[in-house]
Amino acid sequence: MSEATKRGVGTIGGYTVLRREPLERLEGAFIELEHERTGARHIHIECGDDNNGFTVLFPTPPRDSTGVAHILEHVVLAGSQRFPVHDPFFSMTRRSLATFMNAFTSADWTAYPFSTRNAKDFSNLLDVYLDATFFPRLEQDAFMQEGIRFEFETPDDPRSGLRYKGVVFNEMKGALASPAAAMQRAMGKALFSGLTYEHVSGGDPEHIPELTWQKLRDFHASHYHPSNAFFYTYGDRPLESTLEAIERNVLSRFERIIVDSSIPFVKRFTQPVGLTEPYPAVASEDNSRRSQALTAWVTVPSSDSFRLLSMKVLTEVLLSNSGSPLRKALIDSKLGTAMADGTGLQDDYKESVFGAGLKDIRTEDAGKVQEVVLDTLRKLAKDGVDSDQVDAVIHRLEFEKRERSNAGFPYALKVMFSCLPAYNYGGDPYASMNFDADLARLQQERSDGRWFENVIRTELLDNSHRALLTIVPDPELEDGKHKKELERLALIEATLSEPDRNKIAEDALRLKAAQDARQDLSVLPTLELTDIPMKFEPLAPRSTPIGGAAVDFYVLPTNGVTYLDIRSDFSVLPQEQLDLLPLFGRAFTQSGAAGQDYVQIAQRIAAYTGGVGAAAQVQSLAAVEDFVQSFVVSGRALDRNVKPFVEILADLTSRLEIDPARLKEIIAETATRLESSLANLGFQFAILLAQSKLTSEGALNERLQGIRMLHSMRELAKLDEQQLGPIIDQLQAIRTTLFRAEAMQVVVTCEESTVATVSEHLASLVKALPAQKEKTRSPKPPAQHPVPEARIAPVPVAFNVRTFKTVRYTNADAPALLVLANYLRDTFLHKELREKGGAYGGYAQASTGAGLFMLGSYRDPNITRTYDVYDRAVTWVLDSPIEAEQLKEAILGSCGDVDPLESPDIKGRREAVNRLTGFTLQEREKFKHRLLNVTADDLRRVTSRYLANGSGVQVTVAGADLIEAARKEHPDLFAVVEPV
Ligand SMILES: [Zn+2]
């Protein structure tokens, strides 16, 4: 396209179309617009996808650590001019079929994205999002509830002790407790001193109390303005109607202003620096090897798509797999066992940061870790970067560009994040999204000579804007912070007059009354039950046995990508091998095979596939209390790489070679990763432990992913290389048991043109497997003892879970239980646990597959209060009237749960599992039909049967102080109290 046609392609309403470019990866177009009068920017991705996406983003660089941008994000969602209810955002989640709704606060921007496949829903959500962001009420009560307020320990007793309360206040206490958060903080402080990034953008609980309601409102007025707004839309909906709605509802009511949300470039150091930051740890543990060291540099501007691409490729070459030179050198040094938090390239700063380092080191070895990084880089700059490794990374980029998957996150929004740094920091978003031109230039530069060697020199070795960041465990940290907070509150309390005290108590009561007050939600737009699609699309595989293995092909438009799963029933493994299964999953993809070492295997995986993974899965049966146990190897590759892709799988399944030294590294890395993410795993651990007390399926899951798995990993980490010999024999025995032709089910999702090639290569894979006769199944593990249990973890918050046993999917009560979960969460728990209790989340969840019902709290400052809320929740459903509107919302919310967003890669896999477990099309349609007809009486009936008269088990994972305090109140609350 010529320069002339690129610029000023026309106008739409009050917008000028700045640019329209073809977007081959989506068979669509990239359209960039600017609103004439206000200067609002807009990018639209025109394509055939019916999952339409929207985002409005504002640059919001903070000037302190009060969390102003983050708290504003919460308060903005608490009511607006057109929608004056106190939680329109949460209310909309149950009046919508959104495939995604959320809000994010990053280090320097705040974004409000959603996506949906329903046209009416898109307009509804657009109205609510626009009004929330541009015309929020920003009421003082919302600021106090979401941000920070004073409250007495007993809210109406001014003598019970002054405390801080607030949702973000607690959310950040939990969020900042992990080592990863400490590393992030260290990075900001050391590398960006004097700039916005030196602050904790989410808010530091020590500084959150400095924020005032007025400062929050000022921040909104100066940042949430069209002149500072970046809009993004995606999908098959006509752009004109979206722009018209934005203009009518928002832009027509503003004039252009000058907003300075720019961030200066950092002033480069002349000398590298160092910084040490503590993170919370448990005193009883051996903390001598729990530090981390990271060497980090500020590198290229994130807005420069070409230089950023070049840095991205280099980063992948250095670090992406176990054969990558820098990762390998670090692990081989034996100074630590896993990559440090912050390793990799971070492009969510104005200038991107490259970091590399190790976890699980002795504090005094930090300097040695840095020497390994520098030495390796010097060597690569001198001897050259392996060009096969660069080719493998470029192949990966091509793969990512081709794949249109909704796995994990809607593709509609993945596209936005791919161009966000360029869009937000003033670069060329089209170039970064459609990187053909940048890639061609990179290939040219490479062929001209030592491109990456020079990048290593200029951006890293010769760049003195470098910091050595060390984070160290500090068992006293949380206690110290807690004491300091109480002392500070005592000082404040001493200055309070009698009227001050009464005011705080009155405020608390007023807030509580406002939270309890009935709201008129009829102002909010909504979908009706008649808007729900009732039919599921049938999908049938083409089944062809190949050499004894069952093979199912799902032929779908995958855009040139082949997805392949090898499933094998692991119930034939003897009990003692079950605990080794998580390790086997890791060793399977990270070892050598067929005469090649792990480095060569890692390079083949990188060069020919989009990734290969392996893990055990437990899937519930729809009709009976039983489950399928599958070990699943999953991989994906471009169609043209099917041959080398299947050859890799063949080598792994039939000729895996596990070496003791390598296995030791894998175990150490896994154990280290688990230990350093305990703060984030608390909720998952609590849920799994509770489930293990109710069903055999739960007990198995706990073994594979819960605290028991952590304990197995800890035991394995104690073994030396010699002792690993018998373990390797067991792992090999697992392999030969699982990979027998007769035991395998292969699921392939690909396009018609690839079926023959895949079949041909699968035949050789199956042929290479050893012939072995039928195995008998082992008995299933029994459910554990149902006593209430508390586990101590290094977090200043609690995760409280109570779980009940219910019925399976095909039982007529199952749909009512799903509706009950939505109803309880939205009407009662959200209010009691989040709004009043200050927990980040309060949930009810019905696992209709596994036949379980859970009440849970996330990042919760309370334990006993929360269990009381669970008791009250049950009586509340039984004794209070259930309104028709709320029932309808709960049903709508449940419909989203049973009809999630799919893409070809997910569809084939899901159908294969549905067929194995009895979730047939007929059963799913029957379930949905019942769901739409659930009544208030049904809710009361299932509450009475399964919750009031059922037996619940409870598990808390929390910090030691919280557990101790809870036991003082209720000595018999837990039968077992142990560290995680
Ligand atoms: Zn938040």
Image (spheres, helix red, strand yellow):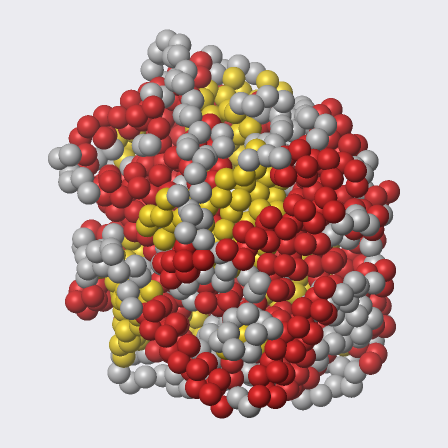
Q: Nearer the viewer, residue 89 or 301?
A: 89
Q: Position of residue 857 (x, y in %)?
A: 54, 53
Q: Nearer the viewer, residue 17 or 329?
A: 329
Residue drawn at x 28%, y 76% as measured from the top left: 275
Which residue ends up furthest to the top in the rendered image?
773
Answer whether residue 706 is visible to the viewer in this image. Answer: yes
Q: Position of residue 302 (x, y in %)?
A: 49, 71
Residue 837 to residue 903: above or below: below
Answer whether residue 553 is visible to the viewer in this image. Answer: no
Residue 947 to residue 9: above or below: above
Relative to 977, 19 lies left or right: right
Residue 22 to residue 748: above or below: below
Q: Write down the quadrant of residue 403 in the picture.
A: top right
The tally of labels here is 0
Residue drawn at x 35%, y 12% as measured from the top left: 771
Residue drawn at x 35%, y 28% as measured from the top left: 578
Q: Write down the quadrant of residue 830 in the picture.
A: bottom right
Relative to 112, 588 lies left or right: left
Relative to 450, 777 lies left or right: right
Q: Nearer the viewer, residue 97 or 754?
A: 97
Residue drawn at x 58%, y 71% as measured from the top left: 155
Relative to 328, 350 lies left or right: right
Q: Position of residue 792 (x, y in %)?
A: 36, 53
Q: Position of residue 873 (x, y in %)?
A: 65, 49
Which quadrant is the N terminus positioned in?
bottom right
